[in-house]
Image (cartoon, rainbow, N blue to C red):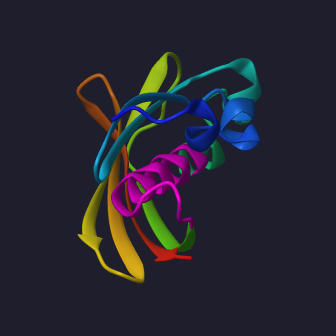
Amino acid sequence: MEVPANLTESAFSQLLGCRLQRLEVGEADVALELTPQLRNRGQKLHGGAIFSLVDIAMGLACSSTHGFDQQSATIECKINYIRAVAEGEVLCRARVIHPGRRTLVVEADVIQGEKLVAKAQGTFAVL
């Protein structure tokens, strides 16, 4: 799915360094490289950066479902952190699992290679 960058990027996603890898109807893959600015006190990828990556990818999956002419907003999101990331890049794969008229339910996996880093589920409102 081809969508102009001004519809898929935000100032915040650019600040984090998120890169859209794939966008299909109901699905979005977004990558994030671990940079010094994204490290926590333990020198691992900060959980807030992972959560932000998830929220960005889920939002793009929603937009690809209802159309980029409409907006959506996060109502709630739950995440389980499975494994710490010490270096390299992670990929968030978000999928809409319930495309309702007013709300969408989305799930996401954050992976590094074949290893699961985090798993999340969220609900988004169509505005």
Residue 58 magenta: yes
User: Which residue occupies the foreground of this view, 14 or 37?
Assistant: 14
Q: Is residue 45 visible from the viewing direction of this image?
A: yes
Residue that appears at 25% across and 72% down? 98
Can the viewer see residue 39 in this picture?
Answer: no
Compared with 91, 48 (above or below) is: below
Taking the image as shown, residue 64 lies to the left or right of residue 98, namely: right
Residue lying at 59% horizontally and 43% vertically, measured from the top left: 7
Question: Which portion, as a residue range, is magenta?
Answer: 52-71
Determine which quarter of the picture holds residue 80: bottom left
Q: Is residue 24 left or right of residue 19?
A: left
Q: Quadrant of the N terminus?
A: top left
Within the image, what quadrant is residue 8 found in? top right
**Left or right of residue 25: residue 58:** right
**Vertical side of 7 occupied by 55: above or below:** below
Query: Main SS type for the magenta part?
Result: helix
Q: Is residue 70 left or right of residue 35?
A: left
> Percent from the top left, x then y, of residue 53?
54, 43
- Residue at x 67%, y 19% (from the top left corner): 35
Outermost residue on the bottom side: it is: 102
